[in-house]
Image: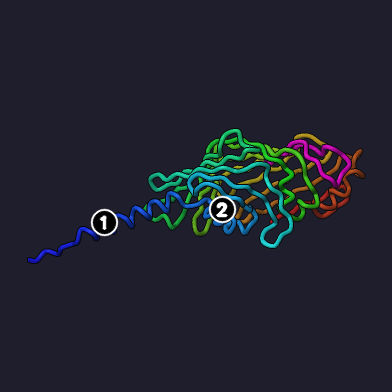
Amino acid sequence: MQRRFVAPWSWTFAGLVCGALVVVVLSAPAQWLVSAINAMTQNRVLMSDGAGTVWQGSAQVALTGGSGSRDSVRLPGRVQWTLGLGWARMHAGLSATCCTATPVQVVLAPLNVLTFWNGWSVQVHQHQSSWPAAVLAGLGTPWNTVQAEGNLALSTPGFTVNMTLDRVTLAGSLALEAQDMRSRLSTLQPLGTYRLDMSGGEQPVLALTTLKGDLQLSGQGRWNAGRMRFEGEARAEPAHAQELSNLLNIMGRRDGVRSVITLG
């Protein structure tokens, strides 16, 4: 039987090609990731001035109302990231000079390594951070009218989002505390401090409560079939009803002394 001879130069060429591909992947510019995130979020999270590589880089980040929107508010400083690959999973670390004392640690993995196309899980480790409420104005209506100011304290003991072709489930919990909130629509400052809790399960639940303040907010929300339905209300303490009237008109459908908030 005649053996097939492979010229040594062909192995050399193949090695050079593979090496070049590895170099390209490892040194892929940060702008590739920046462009991908902008496209995935339809420019609602708008990254610019990318520096470094896909695997370790930084960029400036702004919140916007989407493509064509004139509303845009940039986070102070820069956002840095690191990406790493493990067995059938990707590890990511995200930090912002303005807002995170320690990086947000995230793990992305398939629900089943043999059928990875059927679903993925996103696991966020225990985390605490603090963000300026003013960036919400970049999202457009109604935030650009409310012009909220204050501090948004985000905390979680850890949570996991499981995503398949037909459903999204959440395990764990997440809390957002809006502290000493203010608005240009009211002369009453501050309006109050509020807490939004999200709890996991087959149907993740939202709960909005008022911790203190003359503007009272409350409500409940629930995810069903991949959509969130929230119903709540805003009320003013009687002594400050006039000062909060404009804000109540913006927040929802006015019903006497309260404003009915419906989302979804």
As measured in the structure, the alpha-carbon distance from the residue carrying label 2 to the one carrying label 1 is 35 Å
* Number of marks present in the image shown: 2
Q: Amino acid at mark 1?
A: Thr
Residue 177 position by quadrant: top right
**In front of the other: 222 or 17:** 17
Q: Nearer the viewer, residue 169 or 156?
A: 156
| Residues tagged 2 and 1 counted as in contact (Cβ below 8 A) | no
Residue extent of the magenta highlight: 178-196
**Residue 12: assigned label:** 1
Rendered image quadrant of residue 218: top right
Task: Between residue 16 and residue 196, name the one nearer to us.
Answer: 16
Q: Residue furthest left?
A: 1
User: Which residue is denoted by mark 2 in the rendering?
Assistant: 34
Q: Which numbered disc flags the more N-terminal residue, 2 or 1?
A: 1
Q: Residues within 10 Å of mark 1 (few under 14, many from 20)?
A: few
Chosen colour scheme: rainbow
Element class at badge 1: helix
